[in-house]
Amino acid sequence: MKRVAYLSLYWHPQSPEIGAETRRYVEELIGRYKLKVREFRTDRNSCYFSPLDADSKRFRDLMAEIEKRSDIDDVGLKVWPSYTQRELESSPLLLWFFTNQAIEDDYYTLHFKTGQARGIAPYTRNCEVCRAPLEQVRDIWVDVRKMGKRDLSMTYTFEVILSVHLAQTLQESGLTGFTLRPVWDYRRPQQGEPRLFQFVVTHVLPPMASPPTEFEREQRCGVCGTESRYIKHTHYWGRIQYYEETDIYYAKDVLKTAADFNRTAERFGDLPVSKPYVLISQRAYQWLRGQGVKGWTVEPVYLVE
């Protein structure tokens, strides 16, 4: 795995002289460390760098120097993993992420685009206190035109939507751990054949191995009992806070009962909109690649004794 750093610097000078001095210092850093710049805005006192190798000595030296500069009072730093194909193909379980979110959600479609739909109950039953979704109570209605020619996309509320073609192909694939629900055009709900399907993961994995998995920002509703959290992502480089998600671990025994599509026992995100993560088997990963399905990516999940 390679760690890729996305770095930006901001300074808010109390006087034009201090601002000019900081700007000259940043320009000197660029030359001395041979940095590539995506954008340098002198009018906004900001500089955005091209991606950097977060594990390199150059990057560590650069951060150690920036950390000491009090005139650079806002440092934006995010570190993302980059995996080789060999790393992805050697992982029995992978986190499945969706990169295409194109469909207006059910609430937006019903309550803003069509006046006569006002007052229709949402497709989920939610906790009256924390508003967390507790169960799905009806099929989703969407503007099916937003799907376009895609085979895979998400609603604004993170529901996974499939084309008829992909839904039928999945049903014939022999892959396990999911079911499909019809998705209806909000203009003609429940009429004719569904033009889209909701992909619902049914197989639930046991809790993650923690430790070594680390969590933060854990929440729990005292009324419905729903719990949510984030995978630990808050770190500090001296005074500088930066974002980097940590790895997910399961006990090796999880492979004995895992399906091809799985959802985590844990929910992630802020409590009202939290969702489980989806994990897929190596077989499902290879199937999706073989079908040429677009709009998704994966990361390895690690196994421990």
Image (spheres, rainbow, N blue to C red):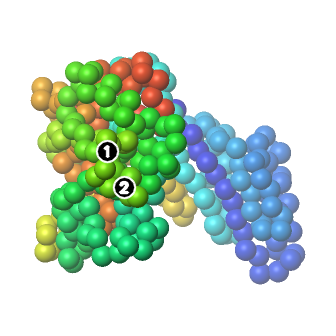
Mark 1, residue position: 192
For residue 109, what is the image quadrant? bottom left
Mark 2, residue position: 188
Label 2: element kind: loop
The residue located at (38%, 66%) in the rendering is 110
Q: Depth check: 196 or 30 in front?
A: 196
Circles 2, 1 touching at the beta carbon (< 8 Å): yes
The residue located at (32%, 63%) in the rendering is 273
Q: Position of residue 132 (x, y in %)?
A: 24, 66
* Residue 287 appears in view: yes
Q: Position of residue 196 (x, y in %)?
A: 36, 42
Q: In the current view of this chain or complex, which residue is farthest to the front? A: 192
State the quadrant of the C terminus.
Answer: top left
Q: Is residue 175 left or right of residue 295?
A: left
Label 1: element kind: loop
Q: CA distance from mark 2 to mark 1?
A: 9 Å
Q: Is residue 188 left or right of residue 173?
A: right
Pointer 1 local density, CA inside 10 Å: few below 14, some 14–19, many at least 20: few
Disc 2 residue type? Answer: Arg
Pointer 2 local density, CA inside 10 Å: few below 14, some 14–19, many at least 20: few
The residue located at (61%, 48%) in the rendering is 6
Q: Position of residue 260 (x, y in %)?
A: 24, 28
The residue located at (51%, 57%) in the rendering is 242
Q: Position of residue 234 (x, y in %)?
A: 43, 58
Disc 1 residue type? Answer: Gly
